[in-house]
Amino acid sequence: MANLAKLPLALQPHHDGSALYVPNQQPKLLEKVKVRIRVHEAIGKLKEVRVRFSESGEAFPTPPAKVIRRDGGWTWYESTIVMHNPKMNYRFLIVLASGEVLWYNTQGLSTLIPADVLDFRINTFSSAPAWGKNAVMYQIFPDRFARSAQADKHKTPDWGVAQQWADPVLVDGRDRSQQFYGGDLWGVIERLDHLKKLGVNLVYLTPMFPGQSNHRYDASSFDQIDPLLGGNKAFAALVEAAHKLGMRVIGDLTTNHSGIGHEWFKAAFKNPSAPESEFYYFSEKNTKYDSWFGVASLPKFNWKSSELRKRFISGKSSVVAKWLKAPYKMDGWRIDVANMTGRIRDEDMYLDVAQTVRKTMVEVNPDTIMLGEYTGDAAYEVQGDGWQGAMTYSNFTKPVWRWFYNTKAQAKRAKVYPTGEYAGFMMWDGNQSGSGRDLVASYNQFIAAFPWHVRLCNMNPLDTHDIPRFKTYAIDGAQKVAAAMQFTFPGIPVIWAGDEFGLDGYSGEHSRTPLPWNGELPTDPSLIGTYAALAKLRRENSALTDGSMRFVYASDEAVAYVRENGKQSIIVLVTRGVEKKIVLAKDAVPGLKKAENIYGGAKIKADGKTFVLPGAALSVNVWRVAK
């Protein structure tokens, strides 16, 4: 019987849905699709390999796969399936010469018949713009990014509590959402050169519509940009300036709710006869209503309303369309709490709303991107037929946090903020410690159900405006290593404004500290160079944007993986602590003896039939093998 436990990680079979394994990355209904797997001789002598695939809810095996090439100890097998349905799932059946049957799916090898939910997924929904997989994203919270001289012309709004740029942010109490620092879009324009230096090519702005808070997720209108930010004129100027520098711009849209100050809500509140009454979930003569998590200032939209759809998400005259058209020409939307949109009690219009938004975007400009926010697992719902990628924390952010988590950080946090609602992590559960093996297992578990085309457009943040800063809770020096993982994993690396300065953030609110352009806070000047170098590395190596992903080593202190496409293999080694000897089998990565170090400077040593990689603590090394 095969001893799978003794089969090294680097020599296990591999398939991931990338172009190396599925050459047709945009299959159409009823089209034939080639599906490949690589199997190493270390598994034992094989009798046959087949693909077990779904068709209309039933499972069928392909004929035995044919051998298409051999590469050292690796043999590549190819089968053909037909896209009988828009969504299909599949796994591999490997029969050893002994007659023993093994299954291979997204979680690796198994002697037991696995559940279909763990199968690989393929569909006909690959429509994300080509630039999506090449994006390096920078997230901006407008009130805290930069304040131009023009901002001085605006009075503090009635809802706001005026702050000086160097004033500390409040992390507790009602006024935390009312602190007004006055950052504006003209200030963003003035700092675009900073983003260019970092290697950024995609700017993501949290809400810019007027509201009653500094975060503006409580929109009072979707038809204008907040005058406090510079209004429509500033936004048009920002997009134009960004485009001239080779950057794209996406906005943030709350399709789940508005604010109570919104013109639609005000027209309908206590007025059941108003046309807008059907836009929300009103009761008791429109004096009560459903809201996001019971937050009274955020009434929830009722997507059964055809008029709401017409005004907001459907067609070229809708809100969704307006900001994608001239004179603004924005490049896409990030949808706030996408996982909750259209869902309440026994109603579920989630996918319908997502598909309607995307259809409108395609009508206006098909070269735009649509990303949905999920605080939890997004894989089984984000398949590309609506959101083309997910802003989620489960598959990348949390596993990386846990590997680098400083177990002393929570005690330090408690001393800084000993009381109040932000004394804990709220829903954030990244405050656990784990090994490199745990990271690999967790990543594979949460990434599994994403089709490859969605995986390439998932956002990979270390932190955002809603959670604590990675640097604050990580062991000292870990940010540079974790940032390298952002830029070398499949997906879109996300720099949350301030990461490049090494800012602290003990909570999501504290993470929104204004950027210290004039030395208002201590910074780490070396981080800007780190992010710029990583962006350059990604830009110059195509395997880091579209290549397959294969883990070849994992221990408590080190993780190594390979990104491969038809042009090159990129080997990445990241460490937490010291790993004295990282050994890879001779043909774990074909061509490894010819590898050239392109980041980090360390050399790979040949040791007989194996290769030894360097294992200094908190290090990053990247090697390239040209094909």
Image (cartoon, grey):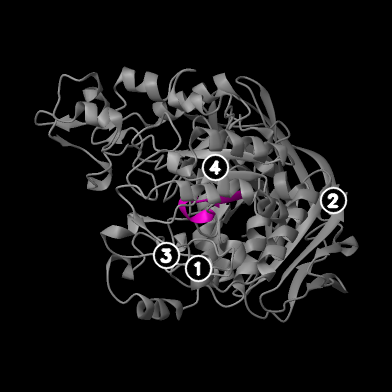
Residue 402 is marked as: 1
Give the magenta-colored segment's residue range: 137-146
CA–CA distance in space, label 1 to label 4: 22 Å
Q: At 48% across and 56% down in the image, what residue appears?
A: 144
Q: Quadrant of residue 580?
A: bottom right
Q: Mark 1 is on which residue type?
A: Arg
Question: Alpha carbon of mark 2 to alpha carbon of mark 1: how far?
Answer: 36 Å
The amino acid at mark 4 is: Phe
Q: In the structure shown, which secondary structural element does the residue marked by tag 4 occupy?
A: loop
The span from disc 4 to disc 2 (Cα, nearest Å) is 28 Å
Dot 3 or dot 1: first in sequence order is: 1
Q: Earlier in the sequence, mark 4 or mark 2?
A: 2
Placement of 95 over or under 244, stated as above or below: below
- The residue beneath circle 4 is 450
Earlier-in-chain disc, 2 versus 1: 2
Which one is in front in this view, the residue at disc 4 or the one at disc 2? 4
Q: What's the residue type where badge 2 is placed?
A: Asp
- Residue holding disc 3: 510
